[in-house]
Amino acid sequence: MIAITKYLYSSSNSGTIYRWSNIGGTPSTSNLSVSAMNSSQASAILVSPNDPTTIYVGTEAGRVVRITDANGSHTGTNISTGLPFKCLQFRLLQKIHLIRDTC
């Protein structure tokens, strides 16, 4: 049997993602300080369907940041071109698509 750890991510401060673990049990929280967010607040958070330790964050400043090892020491990388967007969405091929002005 494979153990599955459930995480919940949110944001309410600039450059910070909050992570709750052990959802359904006794939850614990931690903060991920992500300099690649450039002190901007998250407007979208998406967990990769291929790797639950990788999350994508869209910021109010129009950045898309990939956070790897989100359940550990984490590394944030700006993967956007700086274009504003409204949604992050995964398609059938499991690749991330940036969708602009369609949501």
Image: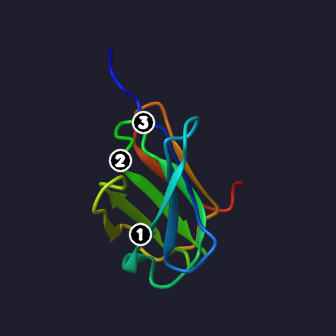
Q: Amino acid at mark 2?
A: Thr
Q: Residue at x 53, y 63 (%)?
A: 18
Judged from this view, the residue extending furthest toward the right is: 103
Work out whether mark 2 precedes mark 1 in sequence or the reverse, and give the earlier one: 2
The location of residue 55, given as percent across then percent down, is: 43, 53
The location of residue 15, given as percent across then percent down, is: 49, 78
For label 3, count other residues whose C-alpha is less than 10 Å away and answer few (under 14), some (14-19) or many (20+).
few
Work out whether mark 1 precedes mark 3 in sequence or the reverse, and give the earlier one: 3
Q: Which residue is disc 3 drawn over?
A: 5
Q: Which residue is disc 1 drawn over?
A: 80
Judged from this view, the residue extending furthest toward the front is: 26
Q: Give the CA distance from mark 2 to mark 1.
A: 20 Å
Q: Which mark is residue 88?
A: none
For label 2, count other residues whose C-alpha is less than 10 Å away and answer few (under 14), some (14-19) or many (20+).
some
Q: Amino acid at mark 1?
A: Ser
Q: Nearer the viewer, residue 5 or 79?
A: 5
Quadrant for residue 50, please give it. top left
Q: Secondary structure at mark 2?
A: loop
Q: Does residue 41 sit above or below 90 in this rendering?
A: below
Q: Give the CA distance from mark 3 to mark 2.
A: 10 Å
Q: Secondary structure at mark 3?
A: loop
Q: Is residue 62 left or right of residue 55?
A: right
Q: Which residue is disc 2 drawn over?
A: 53
Quarter in which the N terminus is drawn: top left
Quarter in which the C terminus is drawn: bottom right
Q: Secondary structure at mark 1?
A: loop
- Which of discs 2 and 1 lies nearer the camera? The answer is 2
Q: Is residue 28 left or right of residue 1?
A: right
